[in-house]
Structure formats: C-alpha cells, structure tokens
Image: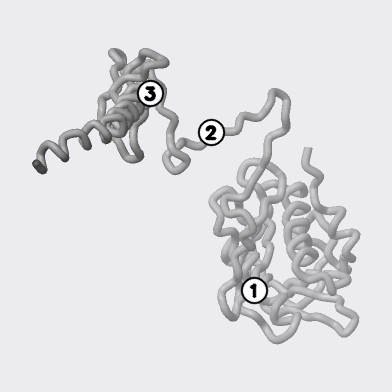
Amino acid sequence: MNSSYDRPSIWLYLPLILGVAAAIVYAVVVHRDELPFGAETPASSPTSGLPLLKPSSPLPVSDPSAVPVAPTPSTAPARPTVASPGAPPTIRSQTPGALPPRPPDGQQPFRLFFRDGKTLALGEETRYLPQQENMRLSLAAAARAWFSGPQTAALAPMFPNSVKVLATFVTRDNDAAIDIQLPPDFAFAGGAAEECLALAALGKTVLENFSEIRSLRILIDGKARPTLAGHIDIDRSWNRAELADLVPVPE
C-alpha cells in the first residue's frame, strides 16, 4: 500500500530535477572558456594563434646575435666623451681639488733660479730649507743653497762649488748684502753674457723669495769690488727694478 501511495509523488519532483539539470548544462556551455582564479595558463592563445612561452621555455632564436641584450646599469661601459672639432682642450688635474704638497715640518720652500743647461735663459727649481728665525739667516740659507748649484739635471750651476758664502747682512731699511769668497782664478767662461746671467739668477732668487728686501749688494771677501769678474759693476747696491732688468726676456 505504501509503494502505491509514494509512486505518484516522484512525478511531482520531476520538473524540479529537469530544471536543475538544464541550469547545469547551460552553465557548462556558456562558461566553458572561463578559468577559475589560480588555474594554469593555456599553452596557446585563441586570439593571437601564437604560442605563449613559459618563463622556463628557451628562446626559439636560431642566431643568438640577432637579439641585442641591453647591459644592466651596473655593467654598462662608460661612454667616452668626444670633444667637438675645434674645441679647446680641457686641462684637468690628476686629482681634482688637491692642494700643493705641504713642505716638511720645520722647513720652507725657496724658488731658486739657475741657467738653463742648453740656452742663456733661466730655469727654476724648488728647494726646501730649514726655517730660520729672521730674514738675515733665511737669506744666508737661500744663498748657500743657490751657490751650491741646482739639483735638477736640466739646469746648470752659475758658480763653481768652491765659492763660499761668508756672511749675509740685512739693514733696518731692508737693504741686503751677500759676502762671498771666490777662487783666485775665477772667471766666467761665457764672458760678460754669462756674468750678467749669473747676477740675474741670483737677483731673481732674492726678489722672488724676499719681497721685503729693497736692494742687494755683492761683497767679495768682505769688501766692495768694482766688478764680479771684470764685466758687471758691483761696487754699489742694485735695487729691485735694476735686478729685474738683468733677467733675460725669453725669445
């Protein structure tokens, strides 16, 4: 009795079952191309028709040189700067902003002038000498260094090593004198031109290192002599302008 009573009730649910089935079929047909979030990307694109390469896939290029690879900023070589034609050259220091070398402790630089080894012109070298307590002693140190000759191979000495500096003097008015001792047979091989150049080199050394000195006089064995070696008058003091006029003008 119960089975005959329940059988007609099945037909009552049949429309509901068919509706659910139709909805499932519709959803599958309409949304078959959509992928849920996180699904794997298909190997081909229906719009382009070209294969999509995965990150691990090798690049299908027959000639590797045909694909330029841009260098990274850290490995890219620096591009040299080329000056335009006719532009003046730029002179830069090896170490931009570097200061001149400081003299050693307790010493000071002196600019010493000598004859160029090949021409009748003056060359210069810098010598570091011990600091002195006054101008007279500084003048004596500079004079002894100058009469000892240059330490630069390109420069030539003006006097033989046998010349000695006996004393130096500086008055209250800053007039200076250098007393020297010459060998008995002393003479300049170049005559008057070389004698004038020697006085010019000594005078320029004094002018460049002692701005306070007004004039310079040369004494020989503590006495005034008419000439140094028979040509140039040294029986008086030479002021700064006269000493500067002795310096030859470069051609």
Alpha-carbon distance for marks 3 and 1? 98 Å
Question: x and y percent of residue 3 in the render?
Answer: 10, 39
Residue at 81% from the left image edge and 80% from the top image edge: 170
Residue 37: x and y, percent?
35, 39
Please say if 156 is above or below 205. above
- The image quarter containing residue 80 is top right
Question: What residue sits right under mark 1 in the picture?
Answer: 108
Cα–Cα span, label 2 and label 1: 45 Å
Q: Which residue shows up at 68% across the image and 39% down it?
A: 90
What's the amino acid at mark 2? Arg
Instruction: From the viewer's perspective, tell me whether residue 71 is left or right of residue 10.
Output: right
Q: Residues within 10 Å of mark 2 (few under 14, many from 20)?
A: few
Instruction: Reply above or below: 185 against 2.
Output: below
Cβ atoms at labels 2 and 3 below 8 Å apart: no
Asked which secondary structure carries label 3, the reply is helix
Q: Residue at x 69, y 46 (%)?
A: 190
Give x and y (percent) for residue 151: 55, 59
